[in-house]
């Protein structure tokens, strides 16, 4: 599911919050901020210790600047530094793979964009930017265009420019931070599949954050049926026991609620 975490200017970086984000979304991280009229992107970090060692010499405690962080769960594309967010808004395949760059516009994404072409190097987000967002150019400043993106992508996006930060989808505001979902909270945990894909589950009782490592197979679904999952399409919580697992998309890493599963199967048949 991933998480976008945006720290407002005037608020210091809270590494406890970012540690929770990393724990729940462990497949790579990055950040972006505005400097001298351009957006600086730095990404490809797989621990907060790595990221902190870069960001503190650069920005100190970060109080003076708004920072857009992203922590990834890999649903499409490989787990690699290059597939971490944020990404520059670009048509250039090589540019979107860079770990350190400056750009007029940076994009971070929370969700899954279905039906992107399969690619060994590029995730669904990267392809969506290259094929659909980059051609829009300055039209991203148009609210009606952003509303259309929200409707068509059915995802959450943060688009950072030198002058504006546009949020697409519903976000949570909490003490000077803005989040795309609640996996920054202490009462959240992750089940990690052997493949490296991590599926976030719903809030649980208690205040500590715990990671449960287990080998996943569709045959042991019953062991998870008491939990709530998040649908990778509509991002709503659902009870796995309500899903017809015999029809689930076994050749993907998607977790879908019954409604989205049925819609997807209909589209594949048609």
Image (cartoon, rainbow, N blue to C red):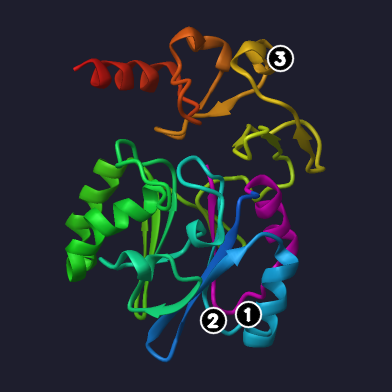
Tell me which label, 3 or 1, sits earlier in the chain: 1
Tell me which label, 2 or 3, sits earlier in the chain: 2
The image quadrant of residue 269 is top left
Q: Nearer the viewer, residue 10 or 246?
A: 246
Q: Is residue 18 magenta?
A: yes
Quote the CA–CA distance across marks 3 and 1: 43 Å
> In this figure, which residue is indicated by the disc labeled 2?
65
Dot in front, 3 or 1? 3
The reply, left or right, for residue 176 in relation to residue 246 is right
Q: Position of residue 90 (x, y in %)?
A: 29, 68
Marks 1 and 2 in Cβ contact (< 8 Å) = yes
Q: Which residues are magenta?
A: 1-25
Please give the label number shown on residue 62.
Answer: 1
Q: Nearer the viewer, residue 246 or 233?
A: 246
> In this figure, which residue is indicated by the disc labeled 3?
223
Q: Position of residue 57 (x, y in %)?
A: 69, 86
Please give the name of the residue rendered at 79% of the width and 40% of the height, measured from the top-left corner: 210
Q: Is residue 241 magenta?
A: no
Q: Is residue 119 above or below residue 134?
A: above
Dot in front, 2 or 3? 3
Q: Position of residue 2 (x, y in %)?
A: 54, 47
């Amino acid at each position: 599911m991933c998480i976008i975490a945006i720290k407002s200017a005037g608020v210091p970086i809270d590494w406890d919050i970012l540690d929770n984000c990393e724990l729940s979304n462990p497949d790579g991280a990055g950040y972006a901020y505005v400097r001298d009229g351009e957006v600086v992107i730095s990404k490809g970090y797989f621990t907060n210790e790595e990221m902190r060692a870069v960001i503190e010499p650069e920005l100190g405690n970060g109080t003076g600047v708004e920072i857009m962080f992203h922590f990834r769960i890999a649903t499409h594309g490989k787990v690699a530094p290059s597939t971490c967010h944020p990404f520059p808004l670009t048509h250039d395949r090589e540019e979107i793979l860079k770990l350190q760059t400056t750009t007029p516009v940076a994009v971070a994404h929370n969700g899954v964009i279905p039906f992107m072409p399969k690619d060994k190097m590029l995730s669904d987000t990267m392809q969506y930017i290259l094929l659909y967002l980059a051609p829009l150019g300055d039209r991203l400043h148009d609210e009606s265009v952003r509303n259309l993106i929200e409707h068509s992508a059915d995802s959450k996006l943060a688009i950072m420019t030198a002058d504006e930060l546009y949020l697409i989808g519903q976000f949570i505001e909490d003490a000077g931070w803005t989040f795309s979902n609640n996996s920054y909270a202490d009462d959240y945990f992750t089940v990690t599949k052997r493949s490296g894909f991590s599926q976030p589950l719903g809030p649980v009782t208690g205040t500590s954050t715990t990671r449960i490592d287990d080998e996943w197979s569709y045959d042991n679904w019953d062991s998870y049926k008491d939990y709530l999952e998040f649908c990778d399409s509509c991002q709503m919580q659902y009870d796995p026991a309500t899903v017809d697992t015999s029809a689930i998309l076994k050749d993907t890493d998607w977790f879908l609620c019954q409604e989205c599963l049925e819609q997807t199967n209909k589209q594949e048949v048609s």
